[in-house]
Image (tube, rainbow, N blue to C red):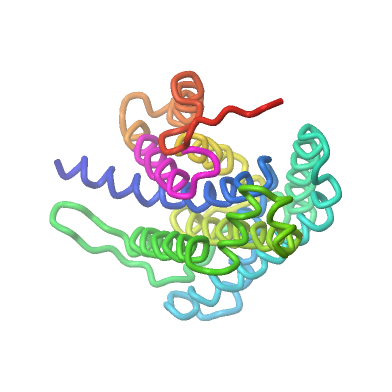
Amino acid sequence: MSEFLQQLLNGLSLGAIYALIALGYTMVYGVLRFINFAHADVFMVGAFIGYYMGQRLPQGTIWGGLIVLTVAMAGCALLGMLIERLAYRRLRGGPTLNVLITAIGVSLLLEYSGQVFFGAAPRTFPAVFPVSTFHLGPVVVSTNQVIVIVVAVLLMVALELIVYRTKMGTAMRAVALNPKAAQLVGINNDVVISFTFGLGSALAAAGGILYALNYPSIDPMMGVMPGLKAFVAAILGGIGNIPGAALGGLILGTVETFIGGSQWSTYKDAIAFAILITILLFRPAGLLGKFTVEKV
């Protein structure tokens, strides 16, 4: 029983990170109906911003960790808006394939630019938050795991409030529903879409920092596998559905952790894609998504 609870805690911690990245995918898809594959590399940039900021602040303090988290989120929000402005805006309304190829190109640009500026060798992420362990019954809990889960939950709640309780959130939902009608009632679609990219990128940066706390070796290619798994999580929960993305991330992280602790541990990375194939075969809309018929 204690081993089960330990694995469950580890899975929820990993799943919370996947959920934060998946939320960025699902937000952009909900508004623009395309997958921003560069999103996983924004996650990487967030981890490196945290790395350089962490070296300049006292380590092992709550306030220092919060500053690192805030700066990384702000930096990646600006990066996300810049990517949208330079790479995607002129392609809006064009063939989906053009946008998809551009997204892959931006992803490769960030990865290899990261190798130029940050170096290809892995780096050890600093302990920006206090690190200790304590026992919760038979379960050994790390403060990093607690921070990951608490921060992820707070950010998800904040996102839900932004989307459903603010004017910008209303505008985002209007643009997602009908961009032309939203423009006719006075909504500036460019501002809304730019804000969506910035918000999603900020969540990816938070995911990068939280991931680096538990897996403290970072490199410019670190976003590839977590990004793919977060994409699977978004599909699993229902692409374009915010609660679905969070649920998909938690389920995927938990399943992967349990597989990693079993005799099938060599297949733990493959399980995400097995889940993707299964969900596309039997429920293409995802767990919380709604099936819709598109006219072509």
Q: Quadrant of residue 141?
A: bottom left
Name the residue: 71% across, 49% down.
120
Judging depth in this view, the residue of 9 and 99 nearest the camera is 99
Q: Is residue 138 left or right of residue 293?
A: left
Q: Is residue 222 left or right of residue 153?
A: right
Q: Which residue shows up at 81% across the image and 34% down it? A: 95
Depth check, front residue: 48 or 180: 180
Magenta residues? 238-257
Question: Majority secondary structure of the magenta segment?
Answer: helix
User: In this view of the protein, which residue sits in the foreground, 198 or 121?
Assistant: 198
Q: Position of residue 167 (x, y in %)?
A: 57, 69
Q: Is residue 127 above or below residue 7?
A: below
Assess whether residue 33 is covered by the magenta stretch: no
Screen quadrant of the N terminus? top left
Q: Which corner quadrant of the image does residue 170 belong to?
A: bottom right
**Quadrant of residue 264 within the rendered picture:** top left
The residue at 73%/45% (across/down) is: 107
